[in-house]
């Protein structure tokens, strides 16, 4: 089952998404859903696919009535790899670079919780006297989540480094 949800209202200072870009993002979502649906068929896995357009990105969520059936695909490294493969498949079909976000079996929420714990440990080190705390390298999406969490906790963060070494440093 594929469900498409549009969110075009501005959230927390974000610019409102215009309808023309929403249709482009819906096309990305449809192309991504086709790719993931084919992958699920090949792997003989059942899954429901939902497409949401928000904050200038297409979000694709794959869920299953039996959450355990997606366990192998929902590992963070696997989701990242599948997201990149899906982005390439979308680019081949649409001719445009895709920034879609893929979530399989709640993997994004699980990773967000892990990142919150990582930030909390780093903030504890700062509260114990460290001038800053560097986190390990992570994707731009994960760094964005970390920046949001750090800001919510009343601290400051900045990304440093290049390429695969890009990481977040937290300060008071």
Image (cartoon, rainbow, N blue to C red):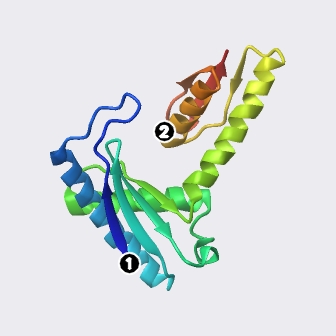
Secondary element at tag 2: helix
Viewer-nearest residue: 33 or 53:
53
Element on which disc 1 rests: helix
- Residue 45, given in percent of the width and then of the height, sits at 51, 82
Q: Position of residue 37 (x, y in %)?
A: 39, 75
Which residue is outermost to the left? 20
Looking at the image, residue 132 sits to the left or right of residue 67; the answer is right
Is residue 139 shown above or below 157? Answer: below
Residue 91 pos. (x, y %): 27, 57
Rendered image quadrant of residue 125 = top right
The residue under label 2 is 140
Is residue 96 positioned above or below 9 on the image?
below
The residue closer to the viewer here, 8 or 96, is 8
Residue 110, compared with residue 164, is above or below; it is below
Which of the pair 84/23 is nearer the observer? 23
Residue located 51% across and 30% down the image: 162
- Tell me the quadrant of the picture where the N terminus can be found: bottom left
Q: Is residue 84 above or below residue 117?
A: below
Q: Which residue is mark 1?
A: 38
Quarter the C terminus occupies: top right
Mark 2 or mark 1: which comes first in sequence?
1
The image quadrant that residue 107 belongs to is bottom right
């Amino acid at each position: 089952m594929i469900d498409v949800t549009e969110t075009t209202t501005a959230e927390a200072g974000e610019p409102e998404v215009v309808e023309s870009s929403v249709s482009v993002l819906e096309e990305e979502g449809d192309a991504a859903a086709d790719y993931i649906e084919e992958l699920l068929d090949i792997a003989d896995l059942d899954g429901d696919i939902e497409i949401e357009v928000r904050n200038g990105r297409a979000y694709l969520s794959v869920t299953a009535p039996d959450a355990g059936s997606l366990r192998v695909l929902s590992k963070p490294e696997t989701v990242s790899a599948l997201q990149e493969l899906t982005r390439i498949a979308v680019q081949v079909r649409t001719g445009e670079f895709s920034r879609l976000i893929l979530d399989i079996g709640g993997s994004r929420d699980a990773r967000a919780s892990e990142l919150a714990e990582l930030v909390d440990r780093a903030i504890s080190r700062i509260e114990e006297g460290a001038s800053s705390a560097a986190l390990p390298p992570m994707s731009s999406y994960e760094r964005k989540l970390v920046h949001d969490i750090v800001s919510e906790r009343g601290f400051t963060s900045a990304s440093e480094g290049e390429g695969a070494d890009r990481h977040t440093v937290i300060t008071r």
